[in-house]
Image (cartoon, rainbow, N blue to C red):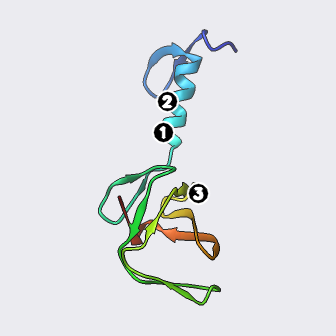
Amino acid sequence: MSDDEYVYDEDSGEWMTAAEQASRRAAENAIEVRDAVGNVLQDGDQVTLIKDLDVKGAGQTLKRGTLIKSIRLTGDAQEIDCKFDGIKGLVLRAEFVRKR
């Protein structure tokens, strides 16, 4: 099927191009990740910790107010992947960060 062919969307009851239907379905399946105060997070955002967190396996505590740069979304609505000096594979829960 070509992207410029029209298809009938049973959910909305409308005729639309195949490309438009694909983009609508992708938008419906997108996961929205929100920080502790409700701001929507995106890849590349900077966040600040709102609570002291003990890092398992690293023997280190990340203090409240620590800036984490360039986060990546994982596909889970509550987890973000990030890098921090001396800690590899750091995954934080979105409820413990605030968008900067």
Q: Position of residue 47 (x, y in %)?
A: 41, 62
From the viewer's side, name the closer residue of 77 and 64: 64
Q: Is residue 31 left or right of residue 100?
A: right
Residue marked by disc 1: 28
Earlier along the polypeptide chain: callout 1 or callout 3? 1
Between label 1 and label 3, give the one nearer the viewer.
Answer: 3
Q: Quadrant of residue 7?
A: top right
Label 2 near label 3: C-beta < 8 Å?
Answer: no
Residue marked by disc 2: 24
Label 2 near label 1: C-beta < 8 Å?
Answer: yes
Which amino acid, mark 1? Glu
Which amino acid, mark 3? Thr
Residue located 42% across and 81% down the image: 63
Q: Is residue 62 left or right of residue 48?
A: right
Q: Position of residue 60 (x, y in %)?
A: 55, 87
Residue located 60% across and 71% down the image: 90
* Mark 3 vs mark 2, CA separation in Å: 21 Å
Q: Secondary structure at mark 2?
A: helix
Residue located 58% across and 57% down the image: 74
Q: Position of residue 50 (x, y in %)?
A: 35, 74
Q: Quadrant of residue 52?
A: bottom left
Q: Quadrant of the C terminus?
A: bottom left
Q: Residue furthest bottom?
A: 59
Residue marked by disc 3: 74
Q: Quadrant of the N terminus?
A: top right
Q: Position of residue 76 (x, y in %)?
A: 54, 59
Q: Residue furthest front?
A: 85
Within 10 angstroms of label 3, few (less than 14), some, or many (20 or more) residues? some
* Mark 1 vs mark 2, CA separation in Å: 6 Å
From the viewer's side, name the closer residue of 73 and 15: 73
Which amino acid, mark 2? Arg
Q: Residue furthest right?
A: 1
